[in-house]
Amino acid sequence: MSYHDILKATRSMVTEYMSGLDPSHDMYHVDRVTRLALDIAHDGKKQGFTIDFELVELAALCHDVGDRKYYQGKETGGQLILQFLNQQQYKKADLVAKIVDHVGFSKELGWNDDLDDKEQVYWRNNCYELFAVQDADKLDAIGAFGILRCAAFSGAKNRPLYVPDHKPIDNISQQEYLNNTSTSSAITHFHGKCYICLLYKEES
């Protein structure tokens, strides 16, 4: 099967998967992230980085498959994608799956370069394909689209837009984020994501 056929099959699968989700995580979001990720990858190539554009494109397309905000199954998104791409006989299915399993705000909150497996730390700090998808996803979480997506997600989850007595936490932990103790309103949720995005920008 050619890459074109694999890409077409993957897009069809993702389109069907995302069709049941709210507007904060729909196929339009996936398309924006995919375009941004490829733009970032092209910029990286101009700077001399070696980049596999197939990995970037497929991982960006699949980055929200298995998202824990919606998916309640036991498999990770990467495991779901690995199974699908293996069925398409795509030789780099494991790499796409690995990238998918490393994209996500809550996942990054749980990383610790000092305590985590050194091989994993090295990979996630040196994989430009991962960088491209991560950054593209973050860019769609801030600015005008980020505000609209945050409001859409809050509406879908019946979360209040603003709670006067609830203060945002700058250094939100993964557990706090997952338990929703520090993201009980749209405002605090958006604040947390913007803070992390700006923090990463300052460190880069």
Image (cartoon, rainbow, N blue to C red):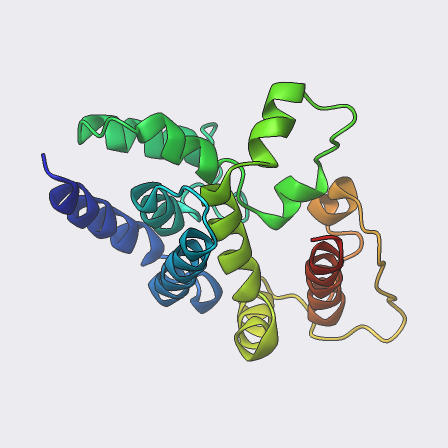
Residue 42's place in the image compared with 178, above or below, is below
Task: Residue 188: give x, y in percent of width and height.
Answer: 76, 66
Q: Quadrant of residue 6?
A: top left
Q: What is the total number of numbered labels drawn onto the structure image?
A: 0
Position of residue 113 in the picture relative to residue 100 (left or right): right
Question: What residue is shown at x 47% (from left), y 51% (from top)?
Answer: 133
Q: In this view, does 110 lie above or below 94?
A: below
Q: Which of 151 and 28 is in front in this view?
A: 28
Nearest the viewer among 77 and 121 is: 121
Residue 79: image location, x then y, percent: 40, 28
- Tell me residue 101's x, y (percent): 50, 35
Q: Residue 136: where, in percent of width, then height?
A: 49, 59
Which quadrant would residue 30 be assigned to in this image? bottom left
Q: In this view, does 7 lie to the left or right of 118?
A: left
Looking at the image, the residue that sits furthest to the bottom is 144
Q: What residue is at 54 percent from the left and 48 percent from the top?
A: 69
- Front position in the image: 135 or 50: 50
Q: In which quarter of the image is the N terminus?
A: top left
At a point 90% along the width and 71% down the height, the residue shown is 165
Q: Say if 114 sits above or below 166 in the image.
A: above
Q: Nearer the viewer, residue 61 or 135?
A: 135
- Tell me if residue 3 comes above or below residue 35 in the rendering: above
Apparent side of residue 167 relative to residue 155 in the rendered image (left or right) = right
Residue at left offset 34%, top offset 51%: 61
